[in-house]
Image: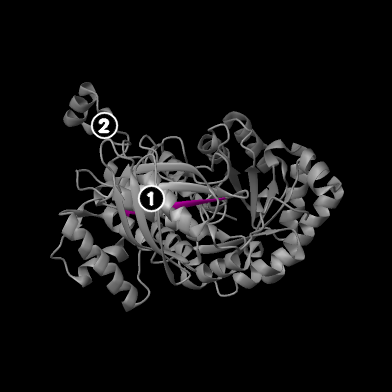
Amino acid sequence: MSNPDKLIIFDTTLRDGEQSPGASMTRDEKLRIARALEKLRVDVIEAGFPIASRGDFEAVQAVARSIKESTICGLARATEKDIDRAGEALREANTGRIHTFIATSPIHMEQKLRMSPDEVVEQAVWAVKRARNLIDDVEFSAEDAGRSDIDFLCRIFERAIDAGATTINVPDTVGYNLPQQFGETIRTLIERIPNSDKAVFSVHCHNDLGLASANSLAAVLNGARQVECTINGLGERAGNASLEEVVMAVRTRRDLFSCDSNLDTTQIVNCSRIVSGITGFPVQPNKAIVGANAFAHEAGIHQDGVLKSRETYEIMRAEDVGWSQNRMVLGKHSGRNAFRARLVELGVDYGSEEELNEGFRSFKELADKKHEIFDDDLLALVNDAGFSAENERVNLVSLRVCSETGEVPNANVVLTLDGVEKSGSSTGGGPVDAAFKAIESIVRTESVLELYSVNAITSGTDAQGEVTVRVRKAGRIVNGQGADTDIVIASAKAYVNAFNKLLQSEKRAHPQLGDV
């Protein structure tokens, strides 16, 4: 049924990646990432879980309307409401897919579903058939397949294929498997299921033991031809298989893999930056492929070898994954059209002239402070401007901070809260602490600051500082991000950004929770 030479890349950054604590995205932010994924030539984009909330439904619907080159997928539990809602969200997709699932491990069937194995099989068959009545492309997943009985998996997958499933997904939902074991599971399923040739076999691996990419690659070596993954390995708990790691491992080791993806790998770094900026999850410097140190050589012997012959220590070219694109592109004399054109190349498209003008004004202000403007600066500017923010209730008007040797730091801040201008002041252990306390004195969220992180976006003393904060209230966790050449102002922007997310009250369902 499938092309054995093609590896299908199924990106779930917008769905599973969004389930990372604090990584919730607005509709417009999902659209930005979806456009970048389309430019990357991702085969399937899982845009969300439509039944989770009205916002999730609208986000999947918007992605389905806008993206034409990639298949758009919506997740649905094996229930009538879930499947019908997914079908409705995907109605305008150029090519769409419903991804339905049910748990198959003994512990999930007994403790969560409280269903017998026979009932689970019949529910799965019913769900696939209902989805096929709405759309031609249906994927079926056996949740917690990594801890499921192999005989039961053979049985339920055979029935799902007979019912019309075109893709069979084998998830290692809790990251429990080891590469050799997981590879053998995939090979056994393909060999033992009589109608396995009528579906593409897929894997979805979690990274709880740091083996998500390794398990995914072992599955590909044993016949899987779709890998479900995320940009930067984003996802629940320890995350998912990292798209960039899987794609580049397969491409680099063509001596072992008999397949390859169709991705334009030069877009990988750009996608990584966009996802990191929107979610507020910085990429660790030593992260494979997309980390700042991925192609850096500190040791003298390494530097000498690379200068003589790149292949001595580099198995990939930095340019092949998009690092060469991080160049200075604009300055203070650049015009509005050049500004817009470069942002479009980076996957950002201002929806209106008013938004473009506001963004260009912010760019000019930055150019007055910072002589060299890099791609990372532009992306940080877009994220910081909140160009895609919705329902923004809090805005930073002004901030004055005094920090002096021997004196207690103090801050005075002016905000607009629901359109009303308010001011507050406070002292603190440092200028950032004072600023945060002054903001809290106005907004009064009574939240807890769980994380505060600062990163320099580019090099030099005039570099923008990018601040990420994580805030928790009543079990809800959100991330906030802000950027500025003044790190205290960047911190205040990040804190305000987090509060805006915290004040959005929409509740979202979780696909792995609740009865089926």
Given the image, on which type of amino acid does mark 1 rest? Answer: Ala
Residue ID at (71%, 64%)? 82
- The residue that disc 2 covers is 311
Up/down of 306 relative to 490, above or below: above
Q: Horizontally, is 187 left or right of 368 in the view?
A: right
Residue ID at (70%, 69%)? 84
Q: Residue furthest bottom?
A: 353
Q: Main secondary structure of the magenta part?
A: strand
Residue ID at (32%, 77%)? 354
Q: Residue 446: where, in percent of width, then height?
A: 55, 51
- The residue that disc 1 covers is 435
On-image quarter of the N terminus: bottom right
**Lower sequence index among marks 2 and 1:** 2
Between 202 and 58, the one lying in front of the other is 58
Q: Horizontally, is 460 left or right of 150 in the view?
A: left
Q: Is residue 407 magenta?
A: no
Q: Which residues are magenta?
A: 477-483
On-image quarter of the C terminus: bottom right
